[in-house]
Amino acid sequence: MRVKRTEVDMAEGDMTPMIDMTFQLIAFFMVLINFAQTEANDNVVLPNSRLVKPPEVALEFPIILHVGADGRVFLGGDDYT
């Protein structure tokens, strides 16, 4: 009596998670490169208004504010903690 041989199918892994992860990595690096270019071109642009320029005459009563290392605030020699 002859025994039938059955073909054994090779087990194949599902490629969907790997493809999904590849697309996520591509999207991540595209966003990362976009942010790096934005930060590289980020120069400080000062406004050209005359209102933002420092005064030509010094203040008559300058305000001097001191903040200590312990967080205490001194305004004109008075402690405002």
Image: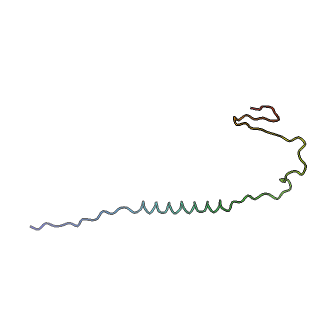
**Residue at 81% in and 33% down:** 77
What residue is drawn where x is 8% and y is 67%?
Answer: 1
- Say left or right for 63 vs 42: right
Marker count (numbered)? 0
The one nearer the camera, 2 or 64, is 64
> Residue drawn 85% across and 53% down?
51
Q: Is residue 73 above or below residue 7?
A: above
Q: Nearer the viewer, residue 50 or 77?
A: 77
Image quarter for residue 65?
top right
Residue 76 image point, x, y percent: 83, 35
Determine the residue positioned at 89% across, 47% down: 58
Viewer-proximal residue among 58 and 38: 58
In percent of width and height, residue 53 lies at: 84, 54
Furthest residue toward front: 69
Q: Is residue 18 left or right of residue 58?
A: left
The vertical placement of 59 against 12, above or below, is above
Q: Quadrant of residue 10?
A: bottom left
Percent position (x, y) of residue 34?
Answer: 60, 62
Who is closer to the viewer here, 6 or 31? 31
Point out the image quarter for the C terminus: top right
Which residue lies most toward the left here? 1
Residue 43 drawn at (x, y percent): 71, 60
Q: How is the image coloured?
A: rainbow
